[in-house]
């Protein structure tokens, strides 16, 4: 079976899952963390080397303050509690996004977890936090211009691989498979350039209900797709 090297997931539907149960949105996010653990386990079982999870977009700051604060403390809690799990499973933690803009405590938790897992390579788990693909491109352009001015970059030599080396994802291969849960059909500012040739799989299941068998179903579908990359069969 053709296994994707890099799976990126837009974890969506926590709020609707909670609403259907008359629970708070935060209860939905809490339940969503259980799915994160299941999916990490499934990725390891299926020998997927790169898993990227979209956890908080730069647009998500526009949600009610309570929800944003709740999400940040869930994140702190996850990092503190699950660091052991990351280490035991030899998982390297990475992030993409402007994490320096997160609350200081969260930022420090992340930096600590990254440092302690930097030498692992069984699974590279990247969390997209305060991530916006458009901002990522803006940041890349700024740095490209700076380097061109310093003469450390010859602008005539700029091609996509070079440009990609300025993206937050510079150390990651482009995703082969993008999964979005909750029946939405959009990228919501996620990996816009990197997903140029990614296969897209949408599941109607809300993220808290997504499980290992749904994950396997996505893998089976992926294996049946023909990726042509502009060529012919
Ligand atoms: C995804 O679930 C998690 C985050 C964006 C943090 P949502 O919170 O977007 O859930 P819905 O889309 O409102 O159901
Ligand atoms: C995308 O979900 C962001 C994350 C999953 C973190 P949203 O729920 O924020 O996206 P929209 O608003 O439905 O496009
Ligand atoms: Mg949503």
Image (tube, rainbow, N blue to C red):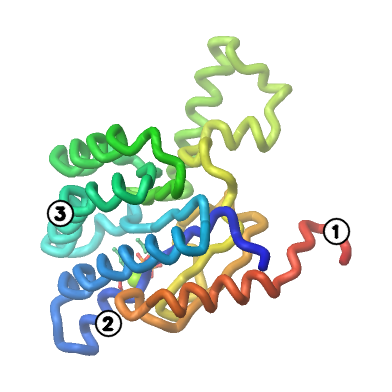
Ligand 2 visible in quadrant: bottom left
Q: Residue at x 61, y 17 (%)?
A: 153
Q: Does the residue labelled 2 lie within 8 Å of ligand 1?
A: yes
Give coordinates of residue 23: x percent, y percent.
14, 82
Give coordinates of residue 232: x percent, y percent.
88, 63
Residue 95 in sight from this viewpoint: no
Q: Circle 1 sits on which residue?
A: 231
User: Which image quadrant for residue 24?
Assistant: bottom left
Separation of marks 2 and 3 at Cα, in angstroms? 21 Å
Judging depth in this view, the residue of 149 and 114 nearest the camera is 114
User: Which image quadrant for residue 65?
Assistant: bottom left
Mark 1 touches mark 2? (CB < 8 Å): no
Disc 2 on helix, strand or loop?
helix
On screen, residue 148 above or below 139: above
Residue most toward the front?
A: 88
Disc 1 on helix, strand or loop?
loop
On screen, residue 108 above or below 125: above
Q: Which residue is drawn at 49% across and 51% down?
A: 50
Badge number at residue 77: 3
Foreground disc of the pair 1, 3: 3
Quadrant of image for the C terminus: bottom right
Of marks 2 and 3, which one's residue comes earlier in the chain? 2
Of marks 1 and 2, which one's residue comes earlier in the chain? 2
Residue 111 in sight from this viewpoint: yes
Badge number at residue 17: 2
Give coordinates of residue 188: x percent, y percent.
45, 62
């Amino acid at each position: 079976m053709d296994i994707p090297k890099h799976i990126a997931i837009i974890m969506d539907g926590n709020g609707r899952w909670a609403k259907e149960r008359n629970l708070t949105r935060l209860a939905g996010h809490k339940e969503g963390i259980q799915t994160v653990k299941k999916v990490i386990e499934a990725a390891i079982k299926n020998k997927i080397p790169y898993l990227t999870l979209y956890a908080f977009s730069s647009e998500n700051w526009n949600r009610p303050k309570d929800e944003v604060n709740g999400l940040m403390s869930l994140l702190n809690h996850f990092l503190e509690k699950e660091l052991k799990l990351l280490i035991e499973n030899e998982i390297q933690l990475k992030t993409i996004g402007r994490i320096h803009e997160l609350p200081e405590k969260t930022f420090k938790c992340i930096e600590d977890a990254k440092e302690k897992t930097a030498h692992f390579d069984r699974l590279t788990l990247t969390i997209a936090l305060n991530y916006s693909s458009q901002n990522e491109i803006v940041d890349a352009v700024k740095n490209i211009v700076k380097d061109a001015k310093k003469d450390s970059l010859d602008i005539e030599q700029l091609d996509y691989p070079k440009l990609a080396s300025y993206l937050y994802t510079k150390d990651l291969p482009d995703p082969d498979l993008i999964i979005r849960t909750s029946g939405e059909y959009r990228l919501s500012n996620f990996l816009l350039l990197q997903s140029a040739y990614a296969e897209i799989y949408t599941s109607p299941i809300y993220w808290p209900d997504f499980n290992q068998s749904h994950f396997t179903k996505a893998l089976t579908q992926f294996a049946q797709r023909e990726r042509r990359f502009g060529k012919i069969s």
